[in-house]
Amino acid sequence: MLVRDAMSTVVLTIGPTHTLRQAARLMSARRIGAAVVHDPDTCGLGIITERDILDAVGSGLDPDRETASAHTTTDVVFAAPAWTLQEAAEAMTHGGFRHLIVLDSDGPVGIVSVRDIIRCWAPARRTFAAAG
């Protein structure tokens, strides 16, 4: 199975000046765990995750004052839609992260997460009747 088959095509893109609260609200509304941060001044793409926001708030930083740029990972490993899920999982394991931005020649087309990979690899959920 390929990354294109597992990735979420809901790609939230925010700017570097979004506050952590704004990023969290947008991510929560879309029920996603990461957002692409596009900085038009540097033409760069980064990623901010729920963990980045949690770490900042947990350490006492003000989510209304802290900007996404201060908490964005900019040394991002990108995946291609044609990668296998094995390649994506190996990149995540090697890098110690849970999300990969998926790029094609036009830019971000999706995000693949550990959860996406598990959904593809694990058997479908089964409902078991409670033994009574």
Image (tube, helix red, strand yellow):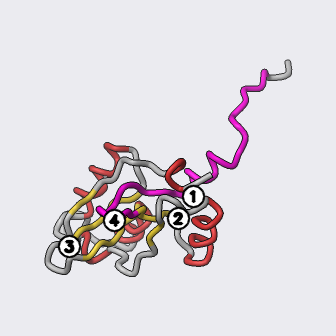
Residue 34, given in percent of the width and then of the height, sits at: 39, 59
Q: CA distance from mark 3 to mark 1?
A: 26 Å
Residue located beneath label 4 in the image = 105
Mark 2 is surrounded, within 10 Å at the Cα level, by few (under 14), some (14 to 19) or many (20 or more) other residues, namely some
- List the single residue furthest toward the left: 41
Q: Marks 2 and 1: in contact by CB < 8 Å?
A: yes
Residue located beneath label 3 in the image = 39
Q: Marks 3 and 4: in contact by CB < 8 Å?
A: no
* First in residue order: circle 4 vs circle 2: 2
In the rendered structure, the answer to whether residue 50 lies left or right of residue 131 reads left
**Residue range (magenta):** 103-129
Quadrant, the C terminus: top right
Helix or strand or loop: what does disc 4 sit on? loop
* First in residue order: circle 3 vs circle 1: 3
Mark 3 is surrounded, within 10 Å at the Cα level, by few (under 14), some (14 to 19) or many (20 or more) other residues, namely some
Question: Would you say residue 124 sits in the magenta stretch?
Answer: yes
* First in residue order: circle 1 vs circle 2: 2
Give amino acid for label 2: Arg
Image disc number at residue 114: 1
Give amino acid for label 3: Asp
Residue located beneath label 2 in the image = 98
Question: Would you say residue 8 sits in the magenta stretch?
Answer: no
Give amino acid for label 1: Val
* First in residue order: circle 2 vs circle 3: 3
Residue at left offset 70%, top offset 46%: 122
* First in residue order: circle 4 vs circle 3: 3
Of residues 71 and 2, which is closer to you in this image? 2
Helix or strand or loop: what does disc 3 sit on? strand
